[in-house]
Image (tube, helix red, strand yellow):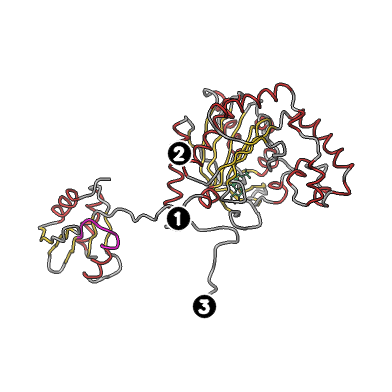
Amino acid sequence: MATKLQASKGTHDVLPDQAPERLALERIARRILEGAGYERIETPAFEVTELFSRGVGGSTDIVQKEMFTFEDEGGRSLTLRPEGTAPIVRSYLEHGMHKLPQPVKLWYWESFFRAEKPQAGRYRQFWQVGAEAIGAAGPAVDAELITLLHAILSEVGTGSLKLRLGSLGTPETRAAYRERLVAYLRTHEDRLSAEVVGRIDLNPLRAFDADDPGTREVMANAPLLLDELAPDDAEHFAAVRARLDAAGIDYVIDPTLVRGLDYYTRTLFEFETDALSSALGGGGRYDGLAEQLGGPATPGIGWAAGVERILLAAEPAPHRVAVCDLYVAGEGVTAFALASEGRRAGLSVQQELAGRSTKGALKQAARLKATAVAVVDDAAGTIHLKDTETGEQTVVPDTTAVIARALKGRHPG
Ligand code: AMP
């Protein structure tokens, strides 16, 4: 026997019993986001690698070790998208969306690929729901996006939510702060973990993420970027907070919040829940990204939340059997014509496909909670229609009459 093949490491199937919860989440996200004027966008599953090395940043874990990269027949380097913002900003620039009324508000529901070590809630292909507002710099956009993600997570019911909020300031503030932080880390090098020391010059902010006690002790007294924000950045941050306060959204200010992407400026946020140890989703402002991708300076902000993570944290939805208006017991030509005509008439019809006896077919129809069952005997040229609620069974002259009766007996909705 040939070896039984399995799904590739870190990937997973979405089985039919999981589909309803995903669909419910997609519907909630869609209603909330489209209600606020965000329009759906889809971008290709792979892009030229340079988009991510330039757009996500060469010092990030994603670019350094998590990308699925391959060459096409012309030797051009391509990468399966590890995140959604760089592709969307690429699309905004490529399609001249700056000519549209600003901000351009977009949302997506797509799968992403990262060569991560698989574990619970961490996969190599995973889905994200995300939203981006490109072309507006004011604090109301930041607060709006945070509020929308909060609304989605609250409606899905992902346990008790915690919103962590921070600000990175502008690249200039960050650069000056970075130097101070590097100098501070260098003076305490002997107490830091080897990994942190190895990354001091590449990405010193990540030291705030470290778990080892030595590094944590050093970081407890490290200078904080939030204390060094330029006046207009501090004002922007205060204005975002004032709007979240006005909307009644709780948050904690986290001066050590860093996210694994280089393009963030100013506002940064992440949602956590007591139901999971890892983050549900997060995002931030990326006012420099369009320029990094060769476009004009364009402000932007967005977030992404993991579909699998949200569903892990959510209450499981009851598995619902699809509505079946008519079950056609019979596999001959008349039965087939009846099923096709019924579907054309708008009925939800399922047909016997497994060669069950009439008795077996009736059992299957009961399992599906079919409203009516038509027993079609091609050889005898008869059709019996059974109303499963009343148990009443009648002989019906032809398929048209079956459909008329099934339409009449159909459950609303
Ligand atoms: P990030 O932009 O990397 O913070 O990703 C945003 C969200 O996507 C995270 O908060 C997770 O919910 C989800 N996510 C990121 N990476 C993975 C992964 N490897 N597997 C499953 N979900 C992920």
Q: Amino acid at mark 1?
A: Gln
Q: Earlier in the sequence, mark 2 or mark 1?
A: 1
Question: What number is the disc on residue 60?
Answer: none
Dot label at residue 18: 1
Dot 3: within a 10 Å radius of its alpha carbon, few (fewer than 14), some, or many (20 or more) residues?
A: few
| Gap in angstroms between the C-alphas marked 3 and 1 | 31 Å
Which residue matches tag 2?
Answer: 30
Q: Pick the residue in front: 79 or 140.
A: 140
Q: Is residue 205 above or below residue 231?
A: below
In the visual, does 89 lie left or right of 404? right
Ranked by sequence position, the earlier of labels 2 and 3 is 3
Give neighbour class at mark 1: few <14, some 14-19, many 20+ (Cα, 10 Å).
some
Label 2: few (<14), some (14–19) or many (≥20) C-alpha neighbours in 10 Å: many
- The magenta stretch spans which residues? 366-373
Q: Secondary structure at mark 2?
A: helix
SS of the residue under disc 3: loop
User: Which residue matches tag 3?
Assistant: 1
Image spot of residue 76 (x, y percent): 66, 46
Residue at 53% x, 71% y is 4
